C-alpha cells in the first residue's frame, strides 16, 4: 500500500478542524440572559457612597422601633445595606434555566416592567420585579424570597427605589421558637436624593 500525501494531509486537516475550538458565543450571550443586578447595585452603592448624603435608618425588630442617622459616605454601612441586593444574581449557572421572564411596556410613557418568576417551588429568589424608565434605567427593584420546610420558614422582601429608599423585610420562624421579623428602611433626610 502506497502512502498518498494528499490523503494524509486531508486527514490532518479534518483532525485539526475537528479540534479547532471556536469562541463560545452562547457563553457571552448567556451572561446577558437576565439583567445584571449585581452590577447595577454595585454602581448604585458606589454612587451612594460618593454622594455623601445624610440618611435616616429605621430598624423595626419584632415591633420595637429604633431610628438613627448616618452619612452615605460610610462605605461599610452602605455595603452592608446593599449586600442582599448585590447577592441577587440570576445569571449564576445554577439559576440559568430556573426563571420565566415577563415584560410589560406602557406605550404612552415608555416605562417598562420586567418580572422574573421562579419555575421551582424552592428557588430563591422566588420573584423579582423591576420598573425601568423610558431610557431603560432601573427605577425600582422588588425581590421576594421564600423558603419553608417542616422546621423552618424564611421570607424576605427587598425593595430598592432609586433616589428614594431602601427597604429590607425579613421574617424567620424556627420550630419551637417565636418568630422574628426585622424591617430596615433607609431614606435620605430632607431634600437629598439617593
Image (cartoon, rainbow, N blue to C red):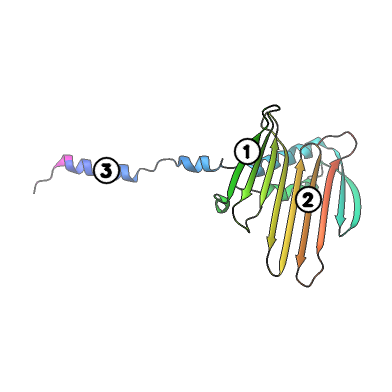
Q: Position of residue 133 (x, y in %)?
A: 70, 31
Give the Cα distance between marks 3 and 1: 46 Å
Q: Nearer the viewer, residue 111 or 23?
A: 111
Residue beneath label 2, please?
168
How dense is the environment of label 1, judged by Cα within 10 Å: few (below 14), some, or many (20 and up)? Answer: few
Q: In this picture, is 126 found above or below 31?
A: below
Residue 129 as seen in the image, left or right of residue 17: right
Cβ atoms under marks 3 and 2 closer than 8 Å = no
Q: Position of residue 34 (x, y in %)?
A: 59, 42
Chain part drawn in magenta: 1-6
Residue 4 colored magenta? yes
How dense is the environment of label 2, judged by Cα within 10 Å: few (below 14), some, or many (20 and up)? Answer: many
Q: Position of residue 15 (x, y in %)?
A: 28, 45
Q: In this picture, is 97 found above or below 139?
A: below
**The C terminus sits in image quarter:** top right
Q: Nearer the viewer, residue 68 or 159?
A: 159
- Residue at 74% x, 54% y: name it: 156
Q: Secondary structure at mark 2?
A: strand
Residue beneath label 3, please?
14
In the picture, the disc for residue 103 is: 1
How dense is the environment of label 3, judged by Cα within 10 Å: few (below 14), some, or many (20 and up)? Answer: few
- Could you tell which of marks 1 and 2 lies nearer the N-terminus? 1
- Residue at 88% x, 33% y: name it: 191
Amino acid at each position: 500500500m502506497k502512502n498518498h500525501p494528499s490523503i494524509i494531509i486531508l486527514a490532518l486537516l479534518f483532525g485539526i478542524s475537528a479540534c479547532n475550538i471556536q469562541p463560545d458565543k452562547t457563553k457571552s450571550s448567556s451572561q446577558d440572559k437576565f439583567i445584571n443586578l449585581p452590577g447595577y447595585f454595585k454602581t448604585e452603592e458606589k454612587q451612594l457612597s460618593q454622594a455623601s448624603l445624610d440618611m435616616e435608618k429605621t430598624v423595626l425588630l419584632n415591633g420595637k422601633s429604633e431610628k438613627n442617622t448616618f452619612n452615605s459616605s460610610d462605605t461599610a454601612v452602605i455595603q452592608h445595606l446593599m449586600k442582599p441586593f448585590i447577592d441577587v444574581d440570576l445569571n449564576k449557572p445554577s439559576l440559568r434555566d430556573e426563571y420565566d421572564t415577563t415584560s410589560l411596556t406602557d406605550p404612552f410613557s415608555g416605562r417598562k416592567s420586567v418580572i422574573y418568576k421562579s419555575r421551582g417551588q424552592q428557588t430563591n429568589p422566588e420573584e423579582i420585579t423591576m420598573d425601568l424608565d423610558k431610557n431603560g434605567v432601573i427605577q425600582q427593584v422588588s425581590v421576594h424570597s421564600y423558603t419553608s420546610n417542616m422546621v423552618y420558614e424564611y421570607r424576605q422582601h427587598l425593595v430598592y427605589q432609586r433616589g428614594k429608599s431602601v427597604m429590607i423585610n425579613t421574617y424567620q420562624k424556627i420550630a419551637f421558637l417565636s418568630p422574628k421579623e426585622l424591617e430596615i428602611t433607609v431614606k435620605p433626610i430632607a431634600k437629598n436624593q439617593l
